[in-house]
Amino acid sequence: MAGEPSNHITKTKYSFKYHINLVCDRGVEPKQWTSFKLNKSVLYLEDSQHRYELSRTADTVGPARYRWAQVLQPHRVTCQLMKTENVPLSAHRVKVLHKSLDWSQIQWANSTVTIADSAYAIKKLFWVPIAQPVNM
């Protein structure tokens, strides 16, 4: 069922079993598009063994570009830890697989996402707001 909570790598009430309806664009309003949501949030997707991070790059000149990265040691990068670190995650937490994707290079399907001709079988997803930790 679309939007059904799932318990895979991430143990959070905000993660959902992957379904294309959770990421496909809905309607003509930009705020209903996944690419628009990436302006303020990062999308985390998981297969049976890995967690991936899809984020908008910091570049503001020209069309939006996106970064696809594999999270290193996903069992250690908990939602609690994400509250104390940068989101998108810093370079020591990820292995960047693609650093400057055009939106057309990201293709959503019923059980996969294809990134620049590489398909990933996605099991679950969750969104995390873009953040920098507050140093006290």
Image (spheres, rainbow, N blue to C red):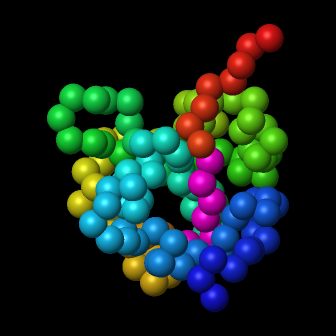
Question: Which quadrant holds the N terminus?
Answer: bottom right
- Residue at figure coordinates x 31%, y 61% from the top left: 29
Q: Position of residue 70 (x, y in %)?
A: 55, 50
Q: Position of residue 2 (x, y in %)?
A: 59, 83
Residue 125, image quadrant:
bottom right
Compared across the picture, whether 61 is left or right of 13 comes to left
Q: Main secondary structure of the magenta part?
A: strand
Q: In which quarter of the image is residue 46?
A: bottom right
Residue 51 in the magenta stretch? The answer is no
Q: What stretch of residues is rendered in magenta? A: 122-128
Rendered location of residue 47, percent (x, y):
61, 69
Which quadrant would residue 24 be assigned to in this image?
Answer: bottom left
- Tell me the residue at 53%/54% (across/down): 43
| 124, above or below 97, in the image | below
Where the C terminus falls, by quadrant? top right
Along the line of sight, the residue nearer the viewer: 114 or 66: 66
Residue 89 percent coordinates (x, y): 59, 36
Identified at 56% across, 37% down, the residue is: 130
